[in-house]
């Protein structure tokens, strides 16, 4: 019988070559309670031995380039995108990738560009779906309804700008969805649940919009919304990045922080994947609230509806496709697929309705829009004339509205790449076939809400 055995402490384990960590307290309790020593203790400790650090790949994984510069301005954009992808593709989890015709850089070299698709094995990279998880588009066919009436009614229902709806204006929250949220450790906190409730039926700001147009093929009026998961998804992103950073420090410290990953085979990975699916359900419901309320107020029954996300992580076996602004063509990526996909370009151009097949070049994806060649600031500086003059010139013949009543010229058509060039490159690289177009009638966007922000109005009154 073992008696009077010296207690093992943390320094003893460090001397044996183990790294300090959260695991150590539990391990020491077990060792001392069971009086483990020598070979018996080493055998038990083997499960905690840290694996060698995973190094960056020496050479970047090859990726498909479905974009080419059409002018000098685009040459700089394309060069930055390719440079960033080359750095990113040295991340040790990555096995494939592609860039789309709407690609544009979003941060320092190594950051996934908008219009990028990156395939990782058994790993989820929160930084590659970003805070706007499940940014997506939904179309509802309103039949022969008057486009102006649809736009007017939708305008009275939707909500743009920061924050959410007050209690009196909130949509009824689905109890089954709430139960899923409360069962997930990443989402079951007051901040997440509060955002999920108050942000339901809201569209945010930036390039998110509510678009009304007419089908080129049928003449029917179509309502299209574009937005993501709002504060609900942003909260999950923040949690995910913290967990991924913990794994990065332990597994691969040389990996760039923005490319940190959560290993899927871990408990954290599986729960994060489940959380992403819940965010997806919420975002789809977010679109439906606005569409259904508009139908109800107009006393119209929908003739058709379909949707797709273009900013998400898609799973195929042990491969995780991170699409940062790329539209899934392959049905395997969308378990609830009900129709073709949607690619909006800009407020003066049609929303494209597309179908397509997976090729080695496209990896099962198409562009998600027109993308940008320059930043918002650069675009703003490039315009001459008053804001109103620029607005009137670029939106002639269209019913364009800004929810805040302040024009945001960085969302006007000239802020985006040439829609014609994007369409040409879609055809050239086999990135989806256009089967119909929703010709623009009008559009609502957030606008420059900061000019009329409540705190600024209060300050002026004082």
Image: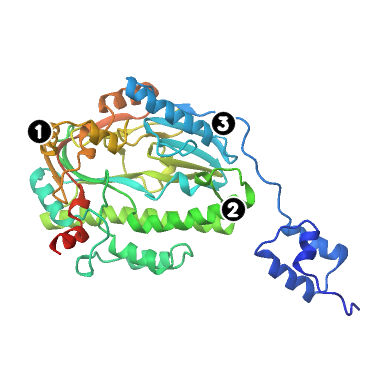
Q: In which quarter of the image is residue 18?
A: bottom right
Q: In this view, does 387 lie to the left or right of 366?
A: left
Residue at mark 2 = 247
Q: Quadrant of residue 295?
A: bottom left
Identify the secondary structure beneath mark 2: helix
Residue at mark 3 = 61
Image coords of residue 9 (percent x, y) = 77, 69
Image coords of residue 397 (percent x, y) = 8, 34
Q: Residues within 10 Å of mark 1 (few under 14, many from 20)?
A: few
For the point 11% across and 54% down, the residue is: 298
C-alpha distance separating marks 1 and 3:
46 Å
Residue at mark 1 = 396
Image coords of residue 115 (percent x, y) = 39, 35
Image coords of residue 321 (percent x, y) = 48, 41
Q: Residues within 10 Å of mark 2 (few under 14, many from 20)?
A: some
Query: What kind of colouring is applied to the model shown?
Result: rainbow
Residue sitting nearer the eye, 299 or 281: 281
Labelled disc at residue 5: none
Residue sitting nearer the eye, 444 or 141: 444
Identify the secondary structure beneath mark 3: loop
For the point 24% across and 34% down, the residue is: 381
C-alpha distance separating marks 3 and 2:
22 Å
Residue sitting nearer the eye, 143 or 97: 97
């Amino acid at each position: 019988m073992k008696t009077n055995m010296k207690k093992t402490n943390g320094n003893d384990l460090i001397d044996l070559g183990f790294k300090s960590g959260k695991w150590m307290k539990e391990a020491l309790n077990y060792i001392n309670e069971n009086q483990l020593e020598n070979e018996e203790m080493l055998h038990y400790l083997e499960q905690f031995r840290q694996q060698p650090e995973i190094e960056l790949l020496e050479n970047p994984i090859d990726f498909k380039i479905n974009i080419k510069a059409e002018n000098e301005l685009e040459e700089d954009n394309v060069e930055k995108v390719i440079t960033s992808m080359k750095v990113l593709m040295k991340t040790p989890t990555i096995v494939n990738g592609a860039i789309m015709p709407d690609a544009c850089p979003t941060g320092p070299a190594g950051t996934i560009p908008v219009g990028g698709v990156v395939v990782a094995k058994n790993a989820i990279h929160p930084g590659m779906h970003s805070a706007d998880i499940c940014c997506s588009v939904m179309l509802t066919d309103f039949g022969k309804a008057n486009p102006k009436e649809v736009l007017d009614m939708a305008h009275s229902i939707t909500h743009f700008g920061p924050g959410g709806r007050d209690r009196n204006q909130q949509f009824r929250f689905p109890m089954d969805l709430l139960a899923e949220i409360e069962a997930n450790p990443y989402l079951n906190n007051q901040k997440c649940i509060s955002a999920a409730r108050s942000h339901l039926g809201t569209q945010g700001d930036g390039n998110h919009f509510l678009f009304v147009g007419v089908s080129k093929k049928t003449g029917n009026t179509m309502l299209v919304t574009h937005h993501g998961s709002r504060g609900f998804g942003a909260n999950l992103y923040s949690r995910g990045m913290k967990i991924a950073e913990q794994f990065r420090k332990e597994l691969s410290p040389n990996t760039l922080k923005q490319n940190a990953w959560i290993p899927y085979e871990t408990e954290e990975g599986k729960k994060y994947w489940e959380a992403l699916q819940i965010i997806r359900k919420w975002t789809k419901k977010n679109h439906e609230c606005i569409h259904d309320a508009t139908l109800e107020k107009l006393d119209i029954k929908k003739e058709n509806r379909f949707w797709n996300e273009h900013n998400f992580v898609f799973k195929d076996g042990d491969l995780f496709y991170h699409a940062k602004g790329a539209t899934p063509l392959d049905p395997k990526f969308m378990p609830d697929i009900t129709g073709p996909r949607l690619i909006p370009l800009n407020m003066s151009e049609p929303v494209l309705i597309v179908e397509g097949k997976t090729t080695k070049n496209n990896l099962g994806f198409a562009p998600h829009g027109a993308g940008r060649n320059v930043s918002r600031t650069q675009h703003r500086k490039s315009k001459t004339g008053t804001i109103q003059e620029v607005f009137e010139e670029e939106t002639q013949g269209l019913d364009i509205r800004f929810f805040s009543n302040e024009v945001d010229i960085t969302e006007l058509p000239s802020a985006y790449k040439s829609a014609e060039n994007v369409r040409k490159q879609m055809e050239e690289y086999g990135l989806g076939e256009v089967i119909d177009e929703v010709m623009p009638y009008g559009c609502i966007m957030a606008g420059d809400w900061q000019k009329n922000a409540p705190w600024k109005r209060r300050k002026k009154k004082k």
